[in-house]
Image (spheres, helix red, strand yellow):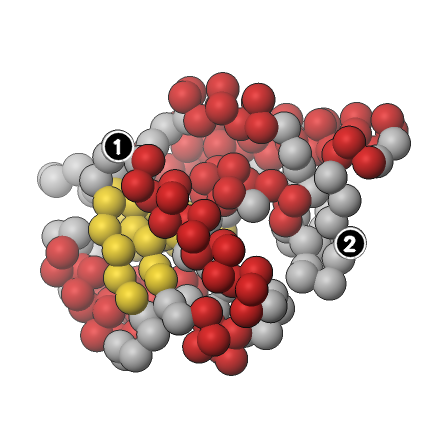
């Protein structure tokens, strides 16, 4: 049996991450291959707040750690440690298990997104991020989806066009610094199905 793959998808809101990964899942199922998709982390550990995403909505007030009280800083640090643990334990007990079976495991955003958009998750520990980044399991392939910011805004109006533009620059900067297998796909005008098939071809799923 061939070894599976661990793939991370990055991209700002509105680029079509979920649509394309779900299409990839269907394509793989049609070919009798198993593809598992998770959001942000392996999700072995349950969320601390039931029915609540860890990251914030665009309307939340994002306050840098230096401006919040000690109690909030401590709570943020404990949450950071808890969810970071999932990247390590979750990989060993969940992701690696599927890869060894020959399956494909996709995580949208992953720990990298916390480094790029720390306030989105109400975390701001850049020193710890650098340490975790060195220790964390890197994906076999990193896929970055890009899109014209105005088009992305029309698809998902949670961030402003300016915020989307900045996010895309940050993602591209991160991708350029990433020293492993990576590829970029523009979703501005191309159909999600066409992109999904092209991704499958290029990363040999």
Q: Residues within 10 Å of mark 2 (few under 14, many from 20)?
A: few
Residue 48 in view in this figure: no
Numbered badge on residue 179 = 1
* Residue at image mark 2: 61
Residue 31 placed where, x, y %? 16, 64
Most foreground residue, 29 or 63: 63
Residue shown at the point (71%, 27%) measured from the top left? 77
Q: Is residue 36 above or below residue 148?
A: above
Residue shown at the point (16%, 52%) measured from the top left? 203
Look at the numbered discs 1 and 2 and tell me whether their residues touch, using CB distance below 8 Å: no
Which of the image's four quarters has the N terminus? top left
Q: Residues within 10 Å of mark 1 (few under 14, many from 20)?
A: few
Residue 33 placed where, x, y %? 21, 56
Residue shown at the point (49%, 54%) measured from the top left? 167
Where on the picture, by quarter, is residue 58?
bottom right
Residue shown at the point (77%, 31%) measured from the top left? 66
SS for dot 1:
loop
Where on the picture, by quarter, is residue 202?
bottom left
SS for dot 2:
loop
Residue 11 in view in this figure: yes
Q: Is residue 23 above or below residue 47?
A: below
Residue 107 placed where, x, y %? 41, 48
Residue 46 placed where, x, y %? 62, 42
Numbered badge on residue 201 = none
Q: Is residue 180 above or below residue 17?
A: above
């Amino acid at each position: 049996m061939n070894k599976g793959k661990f793939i991370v998808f990055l991209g700002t809101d509105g680029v079509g991450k979920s649509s394309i990964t779900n299409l990839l899942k269907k394509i793989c199922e049609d070919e009798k291959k198993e593809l598992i998709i998770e959001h942000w982390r392996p999700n072995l550990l349950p969320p601390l707040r039931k029915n609540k995403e860890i990251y914030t909505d665009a309307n939340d007030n994002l306050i840098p750690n230096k401006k919040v009280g000690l109690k909030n800083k401590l709570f943020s640090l404990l949450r950071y440690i808890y969810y970071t643990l999932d990247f390590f334990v979750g990989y060993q007990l969940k992701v690696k298990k599927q890869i060894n079976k020959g399956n494909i495991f996709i995580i949208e955003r992953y720990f990298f997104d916390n480094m790029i958009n720390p306030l989105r998750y109400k975390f701001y520990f850049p020193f710890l991020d650098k340490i975790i980044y060195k220790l964390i399991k890197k994906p076999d392939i990193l896929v970055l989806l890009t899109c014209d910011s105005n088009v992305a805004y029309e698809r998902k109006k949670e961030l402003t066009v300016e915020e989307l533009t900045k996010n895309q620059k940050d993602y591209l900067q991160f991708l350029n610094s990433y020293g492993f297998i990576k590829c970029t796909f523009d979703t501005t005008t191309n159909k999600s199905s066409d992109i999904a098939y092209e991704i499958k071809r290029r990363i040999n799923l």
